[in-house]
Amino acid sequence: MNEQTPKSRLSLLRAALVIARRDFAAILFSRVFFFFLLGPLFPIIVGALAGGIGSSLDSSAGEPEIAVAMTASDEARLFEAHKALRAELGPGMPLIRQVAELQEGEEFDAPALLDRREGNIAAVLSGTLERPVLTAPESRLGMFRGSVALLTATALGKSPEAFPPVATQVVATSGASDKRGRLATAQAGQTLLFLLIMLLAGMVLSNLVEEKANKIIEILAAAIPMDAVFMGKLFAMLGVSLVGLALWGTVIGGLVTLSDMQGPVAGFVDFSKLPEPGVGWPLFFVLGVVYFSMGYLLLGSIFLAIGSLATTVREVQTMSMPVTMSQVLLFFFASYAMAKPGEPVELLAIAFPLSSPFAMLARAALSESVFPHVVAVAWQALWVFIAVRLGARLFRKRVMKSGPQPVKAKRGLFRKGSARPA
């Protein structure tokens, strides 16, 4: 008689795929996904408004001015020299304005004028052209001393009235400008990667806490391995995040196309001023997606482990705060390591799993080499696997109460001749 063996449970990968497909479809076709897409608009709007307000404040503040208090003859020669120098030097020669016309030998109280803090007056020039006196705060003295010396010398006729023409020759780039441009691209890429990971990785917490409260997680754990539940939820939320990034990228790409790369897009980021990274734009974008995925999975696995221990939203916020703060510190650590290429601090930032995506994205902008990224992605994938396994084991022990239980000591263990129960 042939007995039919019972069908075994799904394998780890197939079970993870079932959970991922379930969570992905449940979130993507819900109202939550719509509000999820609107979430990043608020920091962008706030940043654009802050930038607009900051630029308007800068324009309203105007250039700092030097108040001039001299005799009429000295002032006439000074303003004539300033007109000629301003035409050549532009903003390099600070503005001057008349505040008082003195008589021969009359003194002017410059500190009193600065104490009144009128307009944009940052310094006062008094005395005579032969013996000028510059009164200003200590931070401004170094800024204006050279300009005042050149101005008074020109007014006295000690410098040529006409500047010789300077021939110019334009080159495409230089070593210094290329390095500076790549540093700007690396910093922009790191900042964007950090904001996206911190903004999107927290979604796995609320999803897990909700299913724990509804006892759904116990049903899933009874049917499939807990590792598969963790992996499925992680990759489902990663898929939702990538769909959101694709939609945001399409919108931003449309804005860039409509503006023909002229000026800031929506007044927020000027993409045309970002120089080409070391590996080139196509590969840089691909590596950006890969490192976002690795960073999201690493941080998301930690958040899932925290969510498995928490029972309320308040506990989730309290327990996840140290992780969030440490991630901010790791971002600054990776930014600091970016300025030390090839040194031990950069290698440490690359080796540490949570800072590795930020450090490697910066290296993609600074260096043309591709092979280190292959090794880094494999290293980060290994830590994603370790983090998921540890999180699932922690969930089984602390929440599901599975696994070997500790043996409780009997009351008469340390008493001699304790009677055994009949």
Image: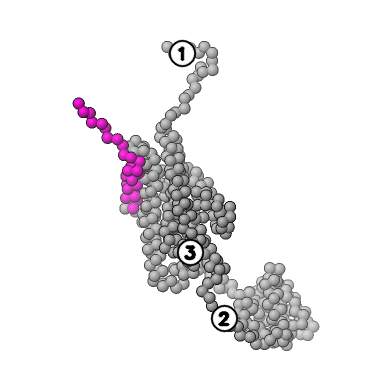
Q: Would you name the residue on which mark 3 appears?
A: 277
Q: Residue at x 45, y 40 (%)?
A: 390
Q: Residue at x 45, y 61 (%)?
A: 284
Q: CA distance from mark 2 to mark 3?
A: 28 Å
Q: What secondary structure is the stretch in magenta mostly built from?
A: helix
Work out whether mark 3 precedes mark 1 in sequence or the reverse, and give the earlier one. Answer: 3
Q: Is residue 395 above or below residue 275?
A: above
What span is in magenta? 1-28
Three-letter code for the amino acid on which mark 3 is drawn: Pro
Q: Residue at x 41, y 69 (%)?
A: 256
- The tag on residue 168 is 2
Work out whether mark 1 precedes mark 2 in sequence or the reverse, and give the earlier one. Answer: 2
Indicate which label's residue lies in the foreground, 3 or 1.
Answer: 3
- Residue contact between numbered discs 3 and 1, judged by CB atoms under 8 Å: no
Q: Would you name the residue on which mark 1 appears?
A: 420
Q: CA distance from mark 1 to mark 2?
A: 103 Å
